[in-house]
Structures are given as structure tokens and as C-alpha cells.
Amino acid sequence: MPSSDLPLNQKTIVLTRALEQQGEAHSLFKLKGAKVLDLPALVIGPPKKWDDLDKALNALETFDWIVFSSSNGVKAVEERLQTMSLSLVNNSNRLKIAAVGRKTAISLKKMGVIPDFVPPKFVADSLIEHFPFIGEELKMLIPRVQSGGRTILAESFGEAGMKVVEVAAYESSCPKQIPERTVKALLNREVDAIIFTSGKTVVHTAQLLFQRFGNDWQKNLDEINLISIGPQTSLSCKKYFSRVDQEAEPHDLEGLVNACILSFNQKENVD
């Protein structure tokens, strides 16, 4: 297909994922003709201490389920297990694994681990709604981001009578600055859409824009479409930017690309 016929031709898209996680998103948007710029709004690193995670992993045989809500959690747990000469791959068959989202499930499969349960929608609420063992007295491990993440999984499963152990497996913090190439594009009104993949990317992007542009930072977003990966990210967009222009469905990278295309089509129809 000629580049002029691609749906995102002549559109400049800003991605806010952690820099090391931009690759797949870059490729998907470029395949649709977009010019892609980075505004990495997350830095993924270790938690402040490993004690709680280590204690849980050393007793992994006592758990019935481990629930991963992100590929970051999968990576952190596997790396920590390997320091103990262990792995999710050769773990006891007794331990079942649930994954929220396609990318999280793919991260497990790349390691040779097939998740026992993936909800039909790629959000935590769907996992709770469709989890097949609600009401059973099970022990569940939930590795999560140290700060800023939702606690809905632990709370809901706890209310359902399960014994839940929730531990910090990694931390996601705010970078120090926006790449100058992206700053220039924002100042020159060359950006057409900003893509948000989590509530934290929204919060950190707002912080970075304020830090760079001062009190009038929102003026730089007036003509820019804001695209969210899912319901919680959309709530953050509305809180920090007072709007969201389109939400992905399904709640994954392919859904984000389609939501971005749809947002431009709807704007053109209105215009």
C-alpha cells in the first residue's frame, strides 16, 4: 500500500511508554504510516527492598495462584527467581498462573509458561469478574508495582475469601525530562496524538509537561488527540487533561492504533 494511503500518513504520534518498551508500539504505528516520537513517561526499576518478594518467592510452593497484571511484573519475578536458581518454567504444577492482558500472557509464553487463565478483556476488573474459582479458599500471590498502582485485585479477591499476599516486585518512576525532539514538535504544533498506556504515564506526562512549559503547559495540547488504552487510563486523562478523545478496544497496542485512527476519522467528519 502506498504510504499516502495509510490511515496515519502525515500524522505525528507521541508514545509515553517506558523507553525499553517502545519497540512494538513504534512498529505498529509506523506500519499505519505515522511518524513516531518518544515521550517516555516511565522508568522501570527495582523496588526499594526485595524482602517481601523474596519471602513470597521462597514459599512459592504454598500458593495456589500467582496473578500478573503486567509484563513488568513477569520480568521482575522471573529475574528474582533466577537469583535463587529457580524459574516459573520449572515450578510446581500445583501453582496456577493468571495474566491480565495479551502482552502479559505473551511475556509468560516467551519464557515457556502457558497461563492458566487470561480474562476476556485485558483489564483487572475483567479478571475478577470472570475468574473461575471465586469463593474457594485459595492462597494467591500478586506481584505489583511498588507505588501508584491499583489495589482492586487484592481487595476483591480478599473480599471473596481468598488469602492474598500482595508484594512490590518493581517500581515505575518519572523520568527527568522530555526528549528535545519531542519538545520541539510540541512547540511547533506538529504533534497530532499522544498515546497513554497506563494511568502512571498520564500522571508523569502531566508532570513533565508542567516542568518543561510551566503553568500554560496545557495550551500545547489544544489540538492534540489524547488516546487511552483502557478505562482507568481514561479516568486519569480526564483528571489531568480534562478529556480523553478515544479509548482502545480491545485494551492493547493494536486497540490503541485503531483508536487513534478512529479519533482522527471522527474529528475529520465533525470538521
Image (cartoon, rainbow, N blue to C red):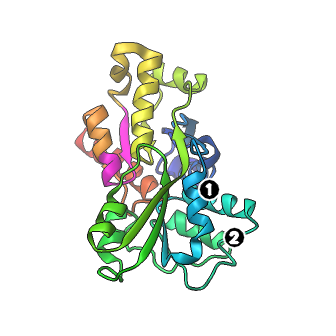
Q: Earlier in the sequence, mark 1 or mark 2?
A: 1
Residue at disc 1, secondary structure: helix
Task: Give yes or no for residue 81 being in the magenta stretch.
Answer: no
Q: In the image, is residue 11 above or below residue 178?
A: below
Q: Is residue 33 visible?
A: no
Q: Residue at x 29, y 47 (%)?
A: 266
Q: Position of residue 8 (x, y in %)?
A: 48, 46
Q: Is residue 232 magenta?
A: yes
Q: How many marks are shown on the rendered structure? A: 2
Image quadrant where residue 270 sits: top left
Residue 257 drawn above or below residue 67: above
Farthest bottom residue? 93
**Above or below: residue 44 compared with residue 122:** above
Q: Nearer the viewer, residue 175 or 37?
A: 175
Residue 132 point in image, percent of width and height? 35, 83
**Mark 1 is on which residue type?**
Ala
Looking at the picture, tell me which residue is in the foreground, 99 or 19: 99
Above-or-below relation of 128 to 268: below
The answer to whether the residue labelled 1 contacts the one labelled 2, judged by CB atoms less than 8 Å apart, is no
Q: Residue at x 32, y 58 (%)?
A: 152
Q: Quadrant of the C terminus?
A: top left
Q: Residue at x 46, y 51 (%)?
A: 7
Residue bearing mark 1? 76
Position of residue 169 measured from the top left corner of the image (x, y, whole percent)? 55, 53
Residue 62, can we see it?
yes
Q: Residue at x 58, y 70 (%)?
A: 59
- Is 200 left or right of 109, judged from the image as shown? left
Residues rendered magenta in the picture: 224-234
Q: CA distance from mark 1 to mark 2?
A: 12 Å
- Relative image position of residue 253 (x, y in whole percent): 49, 56
Residue indicated by mark 2? 87
